[in-house]
Image (cartoon, rainbow, N blue to C red):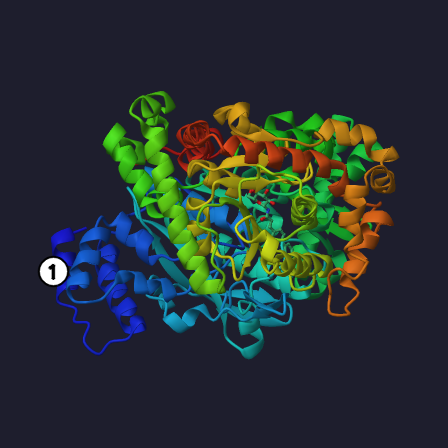
Amino acid sequence: MNKEELLKKLTLISVEGKTVKDLYGEISAACMEEIVKTWDEKPARNAYYLSVEFLMGRMFFNNLMELGVLNEVRNIFAEKGFDLNRFEEVEDAALGNGGLGRLAACYLDSAAGTGYALHGYGIRYRYGLFRQRFENGFQKEEADDWLKWGDPWSVRKESEKRTVRFADMDVTAVPYDMPVLGKRVNTLRLFQAEGSERAEKISEYLYPADDTEEGKLLRIRQEYFFSAAAVGERIDEYVKVYGGRFDRFPEFNVLQLNDTHAVFSVAEFLRILTQEYKVSFGRALQLARKTFHYTNHTILPEALECWDEELVSRILPEIAAILKKLQVFAAREWQKKGCGKSEQDEMSVLRNGRFSMANAAVFVAEHVNGVAEIHTKIIKERLFSAAYKYYPEKFLNVTNGVTQRRWLMLCNEELSALYDGIFGTGWREDLSLLSAENFLRAGGAEQLAKIKRAKKKQLAEYIAKSEGITPMPDAIYVSQVKRLHEYKRQLMTAFAILRLYYAMKAGELADFVPMTFIFGAKAASGYRRAKAIIKYINEIAFKINSDAEMQGKLQVIFVQNYDVSYAEKIIAGSDVSLQVSTAGFEASGTGNMKLTMNGAVTVGTMDGANIEIAQQTGLRNNYIFGATVEELARINESYDPSEIVGRSPEIKAVTDTLIDGTFSDGGSGDFKELHTALFQGASWHKPDHYFVLYDLEQYVSALLKMNSDYRNAGAFARKQAENALNSAFFSSDRAIATYAEKIWKIDRAQ
Ligand code: 26Q
């Protein structure tokens, strides 16, 4: 890339009479012109990340940073009287729901950043994840019209479009390529569905749920659409060079399935080889088993995809037939291995008229991985225990990671500059060069505390501007930012806040350091209890924030439309990270890593990657509480939440607010429903399925311990420093290097 050339070009752009959108388009286009010249040739062996979601976030600042021109361009336009931060109005492309989609984006970033040829395949949704507004405390959803800003960072490849066939229609898949910048320039290829009004529907909306409550034909169409386009393209490219013998296909193509959402690509691969190239089913399967790898991201039963055979047969009869045949082949293999009947049932691809996409993936994939140590243990011992027994060599753990380029260098320039001063700039490419010891010796803790104050101030200003409420300047900023889900237990945080509130009203907690709780979360539009929890927290926020006695003491803010760009601000400006899922439910979490990287201490449970975070950064620097997986397994049968409220008038007072009229749910009955779920059970779950009340007391104690530790500013800064400086393991550079070495067997470009 010719940096001088680019800067010259940018200098020539005039700002007179132009809108933010005009300038955004022009500057981006000028950068793209340079980028496409350097778009790398692919090496022989490439890995492909097949994901129905890529939550890329705003590309502008990231790409300018990667091009090494961000500061110069800032200055060039500042001189012209235009503040580049105006581009903060530009909406992100939110083509993902949450963790899984953002992980895909971090992985593309790290692969390009460290020089691995990893490319993405996905869907170019016309509308991304809905934009969230609160109306009287209720979540309202609005379409995310991200294209109104144009799409200057991708290139439509008209000549590379292809046809995807369904029984009832043909659909054209038109690729849009987005360069992913780093040491290499890789490609994220998103397919847009075209050809007819019905066809276009396929890529119109991202499914706004992170579970599958409503199994839908449209979802199957989406999954097959991009899976078939991707695999069809890989096969065509191969055949062009090597012809119709597929022996060497796995040598050049590594296909990583981001959860089961792309498992149709396996069936499509088998279909093309057997039907179009007359390869035998057995041989095609052998090849598939050297090509595909599967990552599991959830053990929630409602999120494990099972599709009705009838449904799949209706629109994809050949694919249904292939999946059935897969079941027959698998059963034959299991028979040979001597698997018992119940084991075979547990592993079956087709059972009771439903295809299990996870079992298909596990059977075919060469590798199956979980995303944190505890999660991998759970999939080995519980979710896929039979498969683990017969195919132990397939299973491995790759703990998730996050890219320090976006989640440190971009969102926390101040901390990054401090690191440069102490360590030189090498840490930017190798986070493990950070040393807590050297940092502390250089007086880093005090500096970090100063930076944290600055980032809190920036965050407070941003929240004030966006939400119309100003966070207290000297409070502890305590954040819980993630999708709204019962297992993530935002409701438990709400109860904990109420406990603190009532205690203070009763004149207790004299030494309490002021706290501002910051929530960010979207609820799936059809997930009633999740929406009720949002309303409940907003009611609590309203009550506490308007209570004169709480001024300067306690504050609750639920930000609207939490997205990647908002995350960048909250993550840099938080003192405390809340990671309080029910043990065994959060596969990994990645927000926990981002917050740790920015020096927040964790108040959290022994779940997902929290466990590894505590190991890496030290138990003494965090506040780990609550029941472990083992403990929950032990008490599960006998657990009775009403016993807890019977014992504790404080907890009773708090849960009663769901039904005693303290807060209004607008007459919807939603709060009552939350209460019912806690004490009677709901959705075929036992009472308090997520052990909210079981862990509540310990949660409050952990918060109070943290609060009292905060009084010792020096010691607390040291904790924050040890968290930030020991977070290298959670770089997605490490995760990608592990995938590359253990699963993909690909090398870094020299
Ligand atoms: C499936 C079928 C139909 C409609 C929607 C879905 C669907 C969509 C999204 C199912 C699941 C998801 C997303 C799951 C997810 O984000 N899981 C998270 O993955 C992260 C990255 O590994 C982990 O850190 C989180 O712990 C995990 O919850």
The residue under the point 56% across, 63% down is: 206
- Left or right: where 450 falls relative to 136: left
| Along the viewing direction, whichever of 77 and 451 lies nearer the viewer | 451
The image position of residue 154, as x and y in percent, is: 35, 62
Would residue 226 be visible to someone looking at this image? yes
The residue under the point 77% across, 68% down is: 668
The image position of residue 123, as x and y in percent, is: 50, 60
Q: Callout 1: 10 Å neighbours few (<14), some, many (20+)?
A: few
Badge count: 1
**Quadrant placement of the C terminus:** top left
- The answer to whether 109 is drawn above or below residue 467 in the figure is above
The image position of residue 711, as x and y in percent, is: 49, 33
Secondary structure of residue under mark 1: helix
- The answer to whether 453 is drawn above or below residue 308 in the figure is above
Quarter assignment of residue 129: bottom right
Under 8 Å from ligand 1: the CB of mark 1? no
| Along the viewing direction, whichever of 184 and 611 lies nearer the viewer | 611
- Left or right: where 453 falls relative to 640: left
Would residue 44 be visible to someone looking at this image? no
| Along the viewing direction, whichever of 473 and 564 lies nearer the viewer | 473
Mark 1 residue type: Lys
The image position of residue 151, as x and y in percent, is: 36, 67
State the residue position of label 1. 8
- The answer to whether 669 is drawn above or below residue 360 in the figure is below
The residue under the point 55% across, 24% down is: 619
Quarter assignment of residue 79: bottom left
The residue under the point 22% across, 57% down is: 74
